[in-house]
Image (cartoon, rainbow, N blue to C red):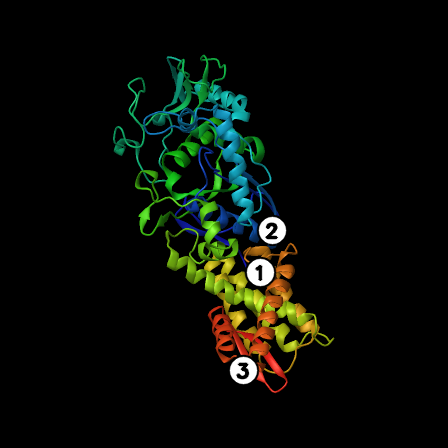
Amino acid sequence: MALKIYNFLTRKKETFHPLYEGKVNMYVCGPTVQDNAHVGHAKTYVNFDVVVRYLRYRGYDVLYVQNITDVGHLLDSGEDRILKKARQASVAPMQIVERYTRLYFEDMDALGIKRPDISPRASGHVPEQIEMIKKLIDQGHAYEVNGSVYYDVSSFPDYGKLSGRKVEDLVEGSRIAVIEEKRHPADFALWKRAEPEHLLRWPSPWGEGFPGWHIECSAMSRKYLGETFDIHGGGIDNIFPHNECEIAQSEAAHNQPFARYWMLVGSLTLDGVKMSKSLGNTLTISEALKRWSPEAIRTFLLSTHYSNPVDFSESAVEGARKGWQRIWGVVSLIQEQMRKAPAGKASEEVLAILNDTRTRFMQKMDDDFNAPAGLATLQELTRQVFFLLNEGDSQTSGTLQAIDELYQELGGDVLGIIPTDGRGAASAERESGLIRLLVDLRAEARAGKDWATADKIRNQLLQLGIILEDRPDGTVWKVE
């Protein structure tokens, strides 16, 4: 089986061939740490988390770099996002940076997203950015005006090859404010002079200032991954101007291809509307986690292909939660039954089902990391296991262990919807213990002819997908 990736740069699906056999160098644009991370960030970073997980599952040695933008990201007005937030809160800019960087990683941890191998900060790599800017000036791709340095887009004929935009078609004033000192409206800032009130400033050959937004990713990816690396990821919203500018300045500076495969995550709306603070319709990750489990949120986000847009709504997430609950219910039941199952080897019939599931799962994931299809494979396995567990004959410990291990492998290690750090077994024990307690309470109610209480317990468990079956030797529970 060959892994295929839809390369946004070429607009086609290509067989993946890393630059160095067995090793993958990957860069993903990280957040601007000036506010709480929201569910749009969750979509991007959950999907790339699964990409990294699957590459490692396939045996690749992955070096994953994701930057932290803590300086240089300007608003359309030309104002620095972090400085504006600092003024509003009457604190130092780096207080804003530290606070929201910590909260960002806490949110990512809570969602079960594995941390990048390197998380470089833009403010910690200003010397590298200055050196790259100097190189672009020397090569005729950039020019200095009044202490600011701009990239000359006319010097790079391939400008627009990722987004499909052409320099001659760009409209003045689009995305950023037109600055009269630029030679062309599409020229973008590599270095900005610092006005007297600007607190974030560094010395440079052109006077005190700060780097532009785009240059940080080019400088940091080169430092940690080289002039050419395998995969560049990010959100579709940043394809222009950010990603386009990365390519232009990197390839102009080094005369080498930049990223070989471009993967862009589709956008996220909230109840059909693009998230906007001015509209009051943002949903932070921490707020979402108060309403749904991390696994339910991940299941929802992985139910749509990473490249497609998705609408985050309560009904959609609830539907995903119920789907995840069915999977987790079966895993919990397996882990409970393992404690009392008779010893024995795994059934050959069951092993054949598990091997087929693994093969089909990898075939789906090899097709451009098709997590929704991979998730569907796991859901089909859940249906098969449900019937297996409810056939009446008890399964051997070997059979149950083999099933559990595949859930941990595909649902845990790759998709991240089954806890694999010990929380799974502990959580399963708690859940099954609570169910057994309710079953016992219902038995007591039945013995006392308190039929109303007995029916209430049965109905409440049924709403959770738990079916009670009364037998001559007692009551057993099953997953719906």
Residue 153 versus residue 18 in the image, above or below: above
Name the residue type under label 1. Answer: Leu
Q: Identify residue for label 1.
A: 410
Residue 17: tell me if it is visible: no
Q: How many marks?
A: 3
- Find residue 359 and report its horizontal and vertical position in percent: 56, 65
Earlier residue among tags 2 and 3:
2
Q: Give residue 10's position: percent from left, percent from top.
A: 40, 46
Distance, label 3 to label 1, CA atoms, is 46 Å
Residue pushed farthest right? 343
- Image position of 473 (left or right of 230): right
Pick whichever, 471 or 99, lies toward us: 471
Residue 22, labelled with which disc?
none
Query: For numbered disc 2, what is the local secondary structure?
Result: helix
Q: Which structural element holds mark 3?
A: loop
Q: Are marks 1 and 2 in contact (CB under 8 Å)?
A: no
The label shown at residue 56 is 2
Q: Secondary structure at mark 1?
A: helix
Q: Residue at x 41, y 51 (%)?
A: 307
Q: CA distance from mark 1 to mark 2?
A: 12 Å
Residue 211 to residue 480: above or below: above
Looking at the picture, which amino acid does disc 3 mark? Lys
Residue 434 percent location from the top left of the image: 59, 66
Q: CA distance from mark 2 to mark 3?
A: 57 Å
Circle nearer the N terminus (3, 1): 1
- With respect to residue 348, does 66 lie above or below? above
